[in-house]
Image: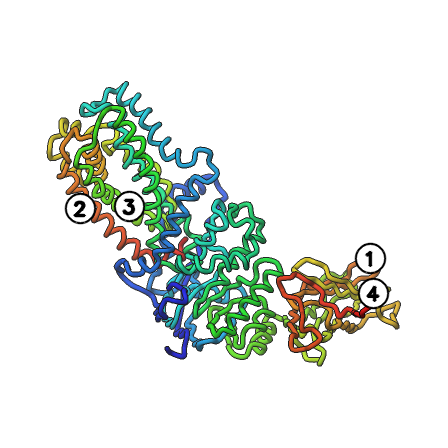
Amino acid sequence: MSEIAIKVSNLSKRYRIGLKEEVHDTFMGSIASWLRSPVSNYRRVHNLASFSTKGESDDIIWALNTVSFNVKRGEVIGIIGANGAGKTTLLKILSRITEPTSGQAIINGNVASLLEVGTGFHPELTGRENLFLNGAVLGMNRNEINRKFDEIVDFSGVEKFIDTPVKRYSSGMRVRLAFSVAAHLEPEILLVDEVLAVGDIDFQNKCIKKMDSLSHEGRTVLLVSHNMSSIQRLCVKVLLMRNGKIFKSGNTREMISTYYDSIGLNEFKFIINKKPADHTKRAFIRKIELFDHKGIPTAVFNRAYPFRVKIEYEVIKPTNNLAVVFSLWAMGNISVCKSFNIDNEENIREKYGPGIYVSKVEFPGKMLNFGIYSFNILLRSGRTLLAFSEKLNFTLTDSSSLPSTARTPKFSDKILLSLPLKWHTEKI
Amino acid sequence: MSSSSESLSQTIVIKPKSGWQLIDWKEIIEYRDLFYFLVKRDVLALYKQTVLGFTWAIIRPVFSMIVFSVIFGGLAKIPSDGIPYPIFTYTALIPWTYFSAAMNMSTQSLISGKGIFSKVYFPRLIIPLTPVLSKLVDFVIAFIILFGLMAWYGISPTVNIFFLPVLILMMMLTASGIGMWLSAMAIQYRDIPQGVGFLAQLLMYASPVVWPLSLLKEKFGESAVLMYGIYPMAGVIEGFRSALLGHNPMPWELIGIGTLTAIFLFISGAFYFKRKERIFVDVA
């Protein structure tokens, strides 16, 4: 068996995007175009899939342009890039869903592709029926599904409803059942597209946990994601794509910062740094940075240690009672806490003159359970909201190597906090 | 593919295919479990949350039979080769109902199956072939009424009933051939499904469902019947009547010519489908 799992050479894919339709502003114009429409419609639909050999017309895009790379057996590779960079097209070609226009790819080993969870689910069918169907769609055979059936149902936690039509399920149950099927695939090579981005944070955590174990089993994984914390957590190497080409590839952290730099963001350094155009604004956030307890910029922290957030903001007009608010979120929309600098700082200034200020906040360790969290920063003055940032993600990892947290609760327990409570036991 | 742990590792080469492709039967066999579950899904999902369930498979041909018996048998006095008109038309309605449903569903299959084939790989040919198999369930159920009618009218089937499988195969080949042609067109040109429902209606009158073949022979002569045999459903329907009701000898010349057409439709459909296959996801 060869050492190379996937070998891609000069892969290209061309698409024709429909040109915009003509707009007629006269009645006669509309009538004339309606009479002509069968011919022009035919041409338009026909041309979707046919390309003239001479010259490129302006509605052709190269979704993938001479892409080459190799993936070694057992490697977990992340693919990142802006929307339309060609990530999904690449996965679709490697999954044999669509054909390349030119170039070739060689895949050594069994492939399963997970471009979506729950492909083929039929709402009228029961959980059991859908489980078999979905398993078959993902490439399992009947015996394999029969063998793993109990395990899958158990993992999904929907035993009670396994004979209920899936349309009666909550969306969460449906996703759990669908993911459980996918989680029991045993391919040598797994192609995953953004699946980790569905469901609640709890489900995302479960996915990542599963992906973690997959990579430890020596499977080859190609993962497309916009979630940099999962990429950082799972992948050793990353391909950064831009405009249908591989812009750069290499070490995960470097690639992520290259990517973020290119779009003016960083997963541990969120830069806005733009004066708002609105002149009534009194202040704006320039930069938000994340550091671990050693002062290293990162967005993945060990949950046993504190981490710090540094907020740089600029006051344009003199402002009274300015407050910086750190707001922490779990599972997407559960507010865990809100902290105001004015409640916690000792020497709080009353008046803020124009200038640049920095506030730092430290979040203690051994507090939150591991998982993916997000936070955002608000600037307020009294009851007025001056500025706010987007929600930024960070990941807290397990710290099972530390004796104090040897019994950290599991992801699936949905426990937010893991506190070092004081206990005392004696015989009376 | 088959991502199962027990299957052997293999090397897949992905590159642009060009020209005509043959059907990869080996691959379809590899994916037989998926094929089976897709057929099963079709069958199971069809009558979910209906009160009458599989009775619907009987209601459609039975009510058509009643309407046709009143209008064509009673009012228009169309001859029925000396057979009671209800059973005469019902025997034809069984294969016809199957054929028009399978053709319709098969034509729509790629459009409705887009959600699956744009997310995972499997031989796409399975998609238009699925309704050809799943519709057989209704077909078999509809036979129950036929045997009831035959008992009622005191008609016993002939030995030729053993040729039914040949006729069934012929009708399946025709339905899948047309299905492969039209589904591959329909995914790109959405005019096709618009037209197929209408086409099925017209084709019914072009088939000997409400009139006997002997009428054609009487009006246009023997050679017209042979020409008509090019349309495979003519042989299938007349064959069904002869085999089950035994009023006429088996129309072997029609069946022979029709089989050739059916095989031609199937092979050409498969080639056309395989040729268009690579653009399905891009135009869907």
Residue drawn at (47%, 72%) of the image: A219
Question: Between marks 1 and 2, how big is the CA–CA gap?
Answer: 83 Å
Q: Residue type at mark 1?
A: Arg
Could you confirm whether marks 1 and 4 are on the same chain?
Answer: yes
Q: Position of residue A275 (x, y in %)?
A: 72, 67
Could you confirm whether marks 2 and 4 are on the same chain?
Answer: no
Could you confirm whether marks 2 and 3 are on the same chain?
Answer: yes
Q: Residue type at mark 2?
A: Leu
Residue topped by disc 4: A322
Residue drawn at (53%, 68%) of the image: A211
Q: Label 2 marks which chain's residue?
A: B
Q: Is residue A269 visible?
A: no
Residue topped by disc 1: A383
Q: Tell which of A34 and A184 is nearer to you.
A: A184
- As drawn, the label of residue B260 is 2
Q: Residue type at mark 4?
A: Leu
Could you confirm whether marks 3 and 1 are on the same chain?
Answer: no
Q: Secondary structure at mark 1?
A: loop
Q: Label 4 marks which chain's residue?
A: A
- As drawn, the label of residue B178 is 3
In the picture provided, is A361 more to the left or to the right than A127?
A: right
